[in-house]
Amino acid sequence: RPSARLALGGFAQGGAAALYAALGGLASAEVRSRLCGVVLCCSGVPALHFLGPRLQDACLRSRQVAESGGGEQARPVSIHMIYGRDDIEVKDNFVQTSHELLKRFDLPVPLYRFRGGTSEDRFPEDVRGAVLTKVVRALLS
């Protein structure tokens, strides 16, 4: 469908791959034109510092397109960050630093935090249902 919107997402390394694919310049023009969001679930993004220059270029291009009144994508891609508090694998300072960095590029970056994860289940099922429902609603609005 020509009007279909796309969102990429993943848990842990899958979220890192989704972010890099969406914002690292790897997506085709058609995919970029349909992309509405990226969902990072408990994802440490080891290559985030590599994305900085690419994000800057992509955001400047998007801003120019929006100011000219047309083009690939009128709405910026939203980055939805979902992280447990006291996550043993992704430290809180990394979450905050990543959140601040992504916000600097004028992207909508909602940060969803939850309690209750364990070392065996970092993204518990009861949390998944509630938080992912919010994220999907936000992406569809």
Image (tube, rainbow, N blue to C red):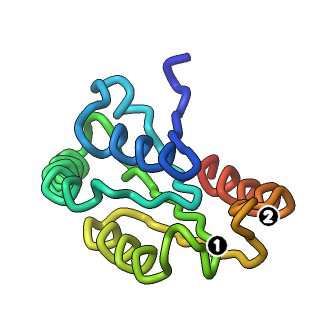
Q: Position of residue 79 (x, y in %)?
A: 46, 57
Q: Earlier in the sequence, mark 1 or mark 2?
A: 1
Local crowd size for mark 1, using a 10 Å CA cut-off: few (<14), some (14–19), many (≥20): many
**Residue 131 seen by the camera:** yes
- Identified by mark 1, the residue type is Gly
- The percent position of residue 27, horizontal first and vertical second, equals 31, 30
In the picture, residue 48 is in which quadrant?
bottom left
- Please, is residue 74 above or below residue 25 in the view? below
Residue 83 screen position, x and y as percent: 59, 69
Which residue does the image show at 33% across and 44% down from the upper left? 20
Query: Dot 2: what SS?
Result: helix
Q: Is residue 30 left or right of residue 63?
A: right
The quarter of the image holding the N terminus is: top right
How many circles with numbers are drawn on the protein?
2
Q: Is residue 21 above or below residue 95?
A: above
The residue under label 2 is: 127
Above or below residue 86? Residue 47 is above
x and y, in percent, of residue 99 in the image? 40, 73
**Which residue lies under the disc numbered 1?**
84
SS of the residue under disc 1: strand
Residue closer to the observer: 121 or 7: 121
Between the C-alphas of marks 1 and 2, the distance is: 10 Å
Q: Are marks 1 and 2 in contact (CB under 8 Å)?
A: yes
Asked if residue 37 shows in the view, the reply is no
Residue drawn at point x = 53 percent, y = 33 percent: 5
Residue at x 33% of width, y 57% of height: 46
Q: Residue furthest right?
A: 126
Amino acid of disc 2:
Val
Q: Residue at x 35, y 78 (%)?
A: 97
